[in-house]
Amino acid sequence: MRDKTNLLVYPYDIEFTPILRHKWLLDGYEIKALVSPSGWGLDGSDAGEADHGSNTGITVTSDFNGMLEHCDAVMFVDTYLKSDFDSIIYPKFEMAINAGKNIVCLIELDGSKKKCIEKKCKENSLEFKYCRIKDSFNFEESNRIMVLLDGEDERITEIVVPVIFVAGLMERMQKFEIQLFLREYLINRGYKISQIGSRQYCEILGFHSFPDFMFCNTLPETKKILLFNRFVKGIEQNENPDVIIIGIPGGTGIYDKTVTNKFGIIAYEVSSALTPDASVLSIPYGNLTPESLQILRLSAKFKFGFEPDCYNIVNARIDSQDSKILNKVMLNWFDAKAIKGLLNYNVLGNGIFNILCDEDGNSMANFIVDKLSAHSEIEYIK
């Protein structure tokens, strides 16, 4: 059994918490330290405070230099909270390299910065692992794909393997936590899983990142739909999975005239490329009623061609005033345990969960497996 690489993760905030909660997916790595800038309010707290879920047993520190001695490598990660790269983040790269630590980078770097860091690592005989190489087709080598690009084939290919969608009404809706939980749950029960994650560095977790052609400004939207369909079909044929999990980036629609969620275009394109056999829609806590859930069901049905099978209720409320001022969704978070007392399950019915609540993750996963099993699409593995 090979030794694991001891990691320092920087800068830590809520964006990394799903990976921390499913850290076994980081094959070959062991997280030894979580470092957050001192002004972010996490210094000295359990890492679970970042997403207001259960404790993780790891205390966050702001002492980057002091924690370097406890690790073999530093993993630089994307964050929700932002710091100036040149004055805050880049100097930490230099500190890590000068201390003889290998670099694992989940941050997208511009070309010059990437070359500079790569050069410094090489000069110091250190490994530089850049994890933002996105999964894509090789257009030049595939005649079939070139035909698609020429507009001569607009057929949608049927995906035979059961597909699970994980979508969110808007950004920051715990989608990645749900994706990783479902992956862990199904793998532990013997399923062979193929997966496309909603982030651009999922290969380090053992599955496909959301393909970069879906964000290409020069590719027509109709081609993106066809390419995504073939992309999933290729995964089905090459990996022969029992089930495919697809995390959809962004939101499913407009929140208001100032917060548009990019109009839910990615969700529309993905759902045009294939139809899910089961789906989770993650939504913020609010004034939920059977009528409001029915509106969400009908909206998804007529926009995307499927109805959500279950809902993840995020332990956060939308701050409408700040969202309008800042032109992005702002959330007020509260302890995940509190959501059990806030939701009227007797009124709302089945299929209502919060992924961070005790046993809700298992209940959600069981709910989805039962949904698939009811249609005899996969065999339930005890």
Image: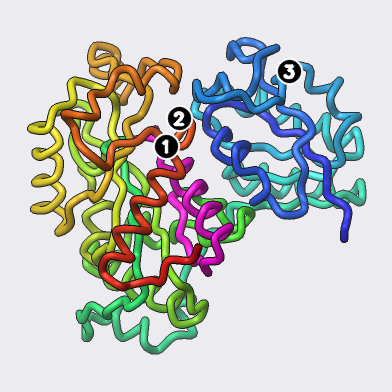
Q: Label for residue 61?
A: 3
Q: For mark 2, does the 10 Å Cα neighbourhood hold few (<14), some (14 to 19), or many (20 or more) residues?
A: some
Q: Which quadrant holds the N terminus? A: bottom right
- Please name whichever residue, 138 or 253, is drawn nearer the observer in this view of the structure: 253
Residue displayed at 9% across by 38% down: 295
Range drawn in magenta: 171-198
State left or right for residue 321 relative to residue 49: left
Dot 1 falls on a residue whose secondary structure is helix
Residue 24: x and y, percent?
Answer: 68, 48
Position in image of residue 169 (x %, y %): 26, 38
Asked if labels 1 and 2 touch by Cβ distance under 8 angstroms, the answer is yes
Foreground: disc 3 or disc 2: 2
Outermost residue, bottom direction? 143
Residue 193 belongs to the span the image colors magenta: yes
Residues packed near mark 1 inside 10 Å, few (<14), some (14 to 19) or many (20 plus): some
The percent coordinates of residue 370 (x first, y second) are: 33, 58
| Residue drawn 63% across the image and 37% down it | 20
Q: Quick one: SS at disc 3?
A: strand
State the count of labels. 3
Mark 1, residue position: 360
| Amino acid type for the residue under numbered disc 3 | Thr
The amino acid marked with disc number 2 is Cys
**Which residue has dot 2 on it?**
357
Residue 355 image-quadrant placement: top left
Dot 3 surroundings within 10 Å: few (below 14), some, or many (20 or more)? many
Task: Please indicate whether residue 67 sits to the left or right of residue 104 in the image.
Answer: right
Looking at the image, residue 42 sits to the left or right of residue 381; the answer is right
